[in-house]
Image (tube, rainbow, N blue to C red):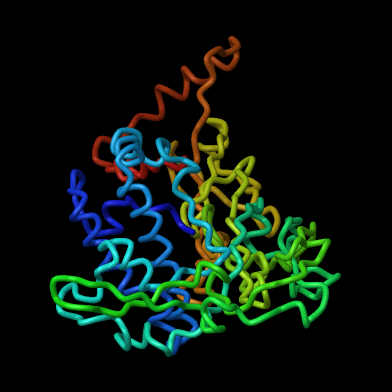
Amino acid sequence: MAEKRDYYEVLGLQKGASADDIKGAYRKAALKWHPDRWVSGTDAEKKTAEEKFKEASEAYSVLSDPDKKAKYDQFGFAGVDGAAGQDWSQGFGNLNDILNNLFGGAFGGFGGFGGFEGFGGFGGSQQGSRVQRGRDIRTRVKVTLEEIANGCDKEVTIERNRPCPDCNGRGAKNASDIKTCPTCKGSGVIQNVTNTLFGRTLTNSTCPHCNGTGKVVTNPCGRCKGTGLVRQKETVKVHIPAGVEDGMQLSLRGEGHAAPQGGVNGDLLIIVEEQPHAQLKRDGANLFYTRVISVADAMLGCEIQIPALDGPQRLKLDPGTQSGTVERLRGKGLPSVNGYGLGSRGDLYVKILVWIPRKLSRSEREAIEKMRDSVRPDPNRDDRALFEKESKYF
């Protein structure tokens, strides 16, 4: 996942926003991105909505708390590290509940909606028991430039919730021990009547007895204590595509924690951690290398060997090569990730530096003295371009 965005930016606010502004911005985000609104969307749309809703909810959990907000305003993410995480193991919550919490249970008459039943496909008797979703798992994978050049397969060991083998994830010893929730009659929601200035309104909220599942366990499994889940250490094979960059996040659908009672598994999120190369530096798909040669090699020309990811490359330098010259080896960089496929490969840039000795022997000094009288800089030549090819990567 990419770097976190500023919480104020996520909610479209400026630093110093009031509590009412924060509440209103989150209401707007919840209405737009709650996953229930995207049940008929494509997989890509569902995933985007899920990520946006999580992001907005995390921002609101910090900015709506005066203490957390003060720490965040002063220290940024470091001030709330570990305090802003959301637990999505029980799904995303009922949108009615979220809005009722924001507006004190009187959302049914707020803004002229006249109750939330039927709005955008939510609420009312159509809500039903909700599908729970397992939590995502995040882990890091270290890769070298050589592995990034061609892509590779890695194995990661993680601990994750899996369906209990003793009860097959039911949470009960026997199927007959799972009963319809007597509070919500299996719907997963309960209806509340609220008296407001605008009259009586009906709102739905998640059933507190069954947490929205519509079922209750009367005789829990002894191994999983009725949760239907047990913790297991497992190894997962991960394919790292060619051309990835440090900090990129790869997602393996369904490889995260299992959800209770047959819900949807969370995802395994792989964060790429690129290892520094001993000789090469990277900028996107391009690589950079610095090579030092002697004065004699610079004057007479030479052939040198350059390290590259697909094996050493030979580079011929012309006589009179100047210090600071940059040579380009086309296609010897990394694959560039372009959209969903691989684009062309980057290049390898080699900067030549000429080494000037600090001490000379008598014979060397005499030879240089003779050469100084015969070789003079030509004031009419313009070699400035050779010395202007500077880069932070050399």
Residue visible at 63% across and 52% down?
140
User: Is 100 on the left or on the right of 361, as rendered?
Assistant: left
Picture layout, residue 316 above or below residue 345: above
Q: Nearer the viewer, residue 171 or 325?
A: 171
Q: Quadrant of residue 9?
A: bottom left
User: Is 306 on the left or on the right of 184, as rendered?
Assistant: right
Find the residue positioned furthest to the top.
Answer: 362
User: Is 239 on the left or on the right of 87, as rendered?
Assistant: right
Residue 17 percent location from the top left of the image: 18, 48
Q: Quadrant of residue 382?
A: top left
Residue visible at 50% across and 23% down?
356
Residue 260 percent location from the top left of the image: 66, 70
Residue 120 percent location from the top left of the image: 32, 86
Q: Nearer the viewer, residue 21 or 374?
A: 21
Residue 87 percent location from the top left of the image: 53, 57
Q: How many marks?
A: 0
Picture layout, residue 184 above or below residue 361: below
- Is residue 150 shown to the viewer in this render? no
Residue visible at 51% across and 79% down?
184
- Is residue 47 shown to the viewer in this render? yes
User: Is 239 on the left or on the right of 19, as rendered?
Assistant: right
